[in-house]
Amino acid sequence: MSYLSLFISAFVAATLLPFYSEVILGVMLVNGANPLWLWLSATCGNTLGSWVNWLLGRYLLHFQHKKWFPFKPESLNKAQNSFKKYGLWSLLFAWLPIIGDPITFVAGIMKVRVLPFLVLVFIGKGARYGIVIALASQVN
């Protein structure tokens, strides 16, 4: 496996598609890959995958009444209200399972500027991957 495969797996994991990058990261760490490069590859890939969600939210909202649209109107409304309540700082939690992808999607709907979006998502996801790498390193 390569850093590019980790980047791609982290990218896909951050989109609305179900996927996990931690397994590839763990295998690469056990096989002696550089932890800094693992962190950078996974964090950048995962952040850019979240940016895809932001783009979808920003530009595809007018398809919300189509069957294939990934969120039901009730859950979309609830997510928008939560984002209004917790604001921009909720993007630090974009790494969380189940709610992370909708947070980034709703950020696009709410027209959050791209630079603050990317910075906050990168910080949150970077912290998460840092913790995953630190914990996995302790197991070895």
Image: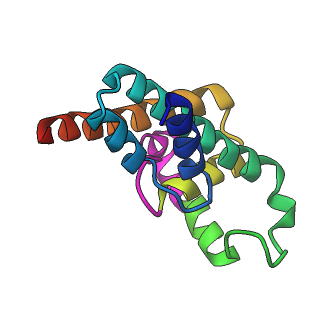
Image coordinates of residue 50 in percent, x first then y, are: 60, 44
- In the shown orientation, is residue 45 left or right of residue 98? right
The colour mode here is: rainbow
- In the shown orientation, is residue 76 left or right of residue 103? right
User: What segment is highlighted magenta in the picture?
Assistant: 82-98
**Residue at 64% in and 53% down:** 105
Image coordinates of residue 120 in percent, x first then y, are: 49, 32
Residue 45, above or below 104: above
- In the shown orientation, is residue 71 left or right of residue 43? right
Image coordinates of residue 75 in percent, x first then y, are: 60, 73
Residue situated in front as seen by the camera: 39 or 30: 30
Residue situated in front as seen by the camera: 7 or 102: 7
Query: Principal SS element in the magenta part?
Result: helix
Q: Is residue 120 visible?
A: no
Residue 89 lies in magenta, yes or no? yes
Q: Quadrant of residue 111?
A: top right
**Residue at 84% in and 75% down:** 66
Q: How many marks?
A: 0
Residue 83 lies in magenta, yes or no? yes
**Residue at 61% in and 36% down:** 48
**Residue at 58% in and 34% down:** 117
Residue 94, above or below 1: below
Residue situated in front as seen by the camera: 80 or 47: 47
Q: Is residue 54 visible?
A: yes
**Quadrant in which the C terminus is drawn:** top left
Image coordinates of residue 21 in percent, x first then y, are: 45, 47
Residue 10, above or below 126: below
